[in-house]
Image: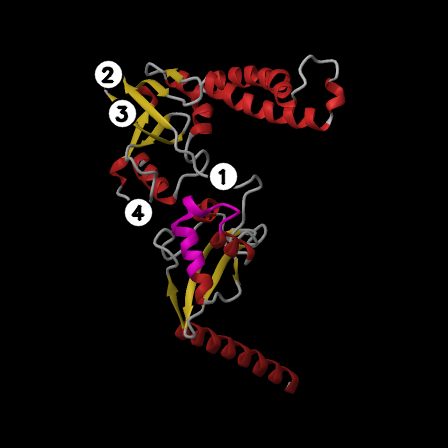
């Protein structure tokens, strides 16, 4: 009986202590918004787009709390394995103000600084708050596109993204910036599009120029290092040999590549959704956001679909 009474006292004390710690934590912590791009809670889409919290398997959501000492705690809500209701909470190491500032800059300027050579990005990644994708982080593309509508009207802008049934462009002269109002966004359904034109800058002559330059340099160095290999040639000048026997063939190769790669892209849709879908994957290769959209654009697309 005494043993049972002692056990009940222990359990009651443990429950009271846990309640007291919880109350104290709530008093000492207040919700903290790292960036307006995230809001009060980090959801799974925002985590995927910004590559946040890579160590949080089973991620459900996350919240930040400002402590009385000025540090920020990240509480991650994760789903238990084979469970749809029960959750566990993981507290990341406390973030000091300088690291919080780096994380804020990482989020707010993500489209600009998300590269391995950026100091702020490295700081956030090295602390385990974010990760780089499996492939090398790329700089965002800015491909010009001209969309001709079925009624003959034309709209020019940067190709933001392309789904299997629609296309979005950014008509402002500046590159996409989440701080700008969304009135620079134009979304076209495949049934509205007559044709899509993407002018390219490459040409035969630019490709030939690069080929000639590279080939001449390589050939010159080779002939200077191994002059005996050219004894049978009538030319005694290594530079001339490099230009003739290496630069010219590479110039022709580069010219052909430049002409092919630099050819304008003209996609004829004529309002046919099936025809547009055939070219959707090619359009995504040239889009600023080929896979995931920034949260702001994602929210607009969801509201437009509802």
Q: Which mark is residue 138?
A: 1
Foreground residue among 147 and 246: 246
Q: Considering only vertical position in the picture, is 49 above or below 166?
A: below
Query: Could you tell me residue 37's position as x and y percent?
Result: 36, 51
Going from the N terminus, do you reach mark 1 or mark 4 first?
1
* Residue on which disc 3 sits: 155
Lateral position of residue 61 relative to residue 188, left or right = right
**Horizontal side of residue 224 vs 299, given as left or right:** right
Q: Which residue is mark 4?
A: 179
Q: Is-magenta flag for residue 95? A: no
Q: Residue furthest right?
A: 228
The residue singled out by tag 2 in the image is 152
* Element assignment for label 2: loop
Q: Residue at x 52, y 15 (%)?
A: 256
Q: Which residues are magenta?
A: 101-118
Q: How is colour applied across the structure in the image? A: secondary structure
Residue 94: % across, % down: 50, 67
Mark 3 element type? strand
């Amino acid at each position: 009986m005494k043993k049972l009474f002692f056990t009940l006292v222990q359990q009651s004390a443990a429950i009271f202590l846990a309640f007291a710690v919880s109350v104290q934590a709530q008093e000492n912590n207040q919700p903290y918004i790292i960036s307006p791009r995230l809001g009060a809670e980090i959801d799974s889409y925002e985590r995927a787009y910004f590559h946040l919290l890579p160590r949080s398997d089973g991620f459900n959501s996350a919240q930040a709390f400002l402590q009385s000492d000025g540090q920020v705690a990240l509480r991650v809500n994760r789903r238990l394995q084979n469970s749809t209701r029960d959750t566990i909470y993981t507290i990341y190491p406390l973030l000091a103000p300088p690291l919080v500032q780096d994380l804020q800059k990482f989020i707010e300027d993500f489209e600009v600084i998300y590269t391995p050579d950026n100091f702020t990005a490295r700081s956030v990644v090295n602390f385990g708050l974010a990760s780089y994708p499996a492939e090398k982080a790329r700089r965002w593309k800015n491909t010009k596109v001209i969309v001709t509508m079925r009624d003959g009207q034309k709209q020019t802008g940067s190709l933001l993204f392309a789904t299997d049934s629609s296309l979005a462009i950014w008509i402002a002269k500046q590159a996409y910036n989440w701080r700008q109002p969304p009135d620079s966004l134009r979304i076209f359904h495949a049934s509205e599009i007559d044709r899509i034109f993407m002018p390219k800058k490459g040409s035969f002559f630019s490709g030939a120029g690069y080929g000639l330059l590279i080939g001449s340099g390589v050939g010159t160095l080779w002939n200077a290092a191994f002059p005996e290999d050219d004894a049978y040639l009538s030319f005694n000048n290594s530079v001339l040999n490099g230009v003739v026997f290496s630069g010219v063939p590479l110039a022709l190769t580069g010219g052909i590549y430049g002409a092919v790669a630099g050819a304008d892209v003209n996609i004829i849709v004529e309002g046919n959704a099936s025809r547009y879908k055939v070219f959707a994957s090619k359009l995504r290769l040239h889009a600023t956001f080929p896979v995931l959209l920034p949260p702001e654009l994602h929210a607009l697309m969801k509201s437009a679909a509802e």
